[in-house]
Amino acid sequence: MWIVFFFQGMTPGFWLPALTNIFAARGLSGWVALVFVVPPICALISPLVGGALADQRVAADRLYVWSTVIGAALLLAAFACLDAGLHPWYFVILLGLYSLFSAPAWGLLTTISLTHLPQGERQFPLVRLGATIGWMVAGGMTSYLLHADVSPKVGYASAAARLIGGLCALMLPQTPPLGKGSSWQSRLGLDAFQLMKQRDHCVFFVVTALFSVPLSAFYMYAPELLKVLGDHRSTATMTIAQASEVAAMFLVGRVMLRFRVKTVLLWALGLSAVRFGMSAYAGSSGLISWHIAGIALHGMCYTFYFITAQVFLDRRVDPGLKGQAQGLLALVSGGLGPLVGALICGWLRNHYVTADGRGWMEFWTVLSAMIGVCFAIFLFCYKGLGRGGESAEANSPPAQL
């Protein structure tokens, strides 16, 4: 599981932090917002369908293998078109198809892991750590081995990592479907929306979607600000976020067992607002150290929010809905949120940031305020109620809240 997570994280670690600068180097900066919009659109439905298939019809491990291998071929084709100088639409369409097939992968791998790990709260963060280290290795290789911070050749390395991960996934433990469904709603994974009828689940998914909107700016524009502030190895610098994730992975299991889920998620949201504020100050003062410190804090915030969220869902939903629940989480955090975020962040960047590098303070400040709104909604609307309406905070172990 750790090895498969390693290559799963390595795949976007090669190309995602470098993508904005790659397009800028080719005079295609105007395409950046569209490039970040299309994948979330394509990922809006496939996580739910993938989760439904894993719950009802196809073993999750085999579904992950096919998703990964097909995704590797499409990713290779996308970057080959960009490298050949073809019209950007070829890249956009192929990247969209890649996202369509690959979007269920994170949820499927999470379902497989939490199904077979006897102590999910303690063990899953350590297994998931493989993805973080894979991302770090990819970023370091991009900048220091491949020297491809602005080259489409990172896509070739990414596709190779994806393919190797898919082949390694053939050795994952068998994870047969546990649910049943015959209606078209079940086959499309729409049964997952039943979770929204429970108040806390509804608040959780809404806040996660809203939180994912400003987070879209991290890989869209954090590397660009690094370049503006004088860093010419921005892809490697971005891996500092993954370095802090490593530390957070060792802590999050113990934190989940000791504190209420509401408390952990509020910490993550509050620190995220601070993290974006640090980048705002860097944009105002020109001190790159503040932006780098914010990048480091980002990794810890991401871990404490999304790893806690994945374990929370696994413990709170019925076995026949686990895949769909993880798919719904992937939909709001990897589809809906980033889709809206790419549009809003693209507009904010064009509205505030000028050609001479001014306006970054206003850009990051607005995003920090958005996260502050998420914090307030979660603080006042999430009640911590159990399935029967009684206080889960008082009657359940912390990991189940």
Image (spheres, rainbow, N blue to C red):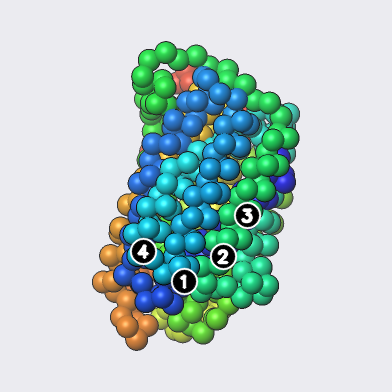
- In the visual, does 394 lie left or right of 372? right
3 or 2: tag closer to the N-terminus = 2
- Whole-angstrom CA distance, mark 1 to mark 4, is 12 Å
Judge by depth and name the residue closer to the eye, 151 or 54.
Answer: 151
1 or 4: tag closer to the N-terminus = 1
- Whole-angstrom CA distance, mark 3 to mark 4, is 22 Å
Q: State whether residue 227 appears in this view.
A: yes
Q: Residues within 10 Å of mark 4 (few under 14, many from 20)?
A: some
Image quarter (top left, top right, bottom left or bottom right) of the C terminus = top right
- Residue 154: image location, x then y, percent: 56, 65
- Residue 94: image location, x then y, percent: 42, 52
- Residue marked by disc 1: 22
Q: Which mark is residue 171?
A: none
- Residue marked by disc 2: 154
Q: Residues within 10 Å of mark 1 (few under 14, many from 20)?
A: many
Going by the numbered disc 3, the residue's amino acid type is: Ala
- Residue marked by disc 3: 160
Q: State whether residue 128 appears in this view.
A: no
**Label 1 with label 2: CB-CB less than 8 Å:** yes
Going by the numbered disc 4, the residue's amino acid type is: Pro
- Residue marked by disc 4: 88
Assign a secondary structure to mark 2. Answer: helix
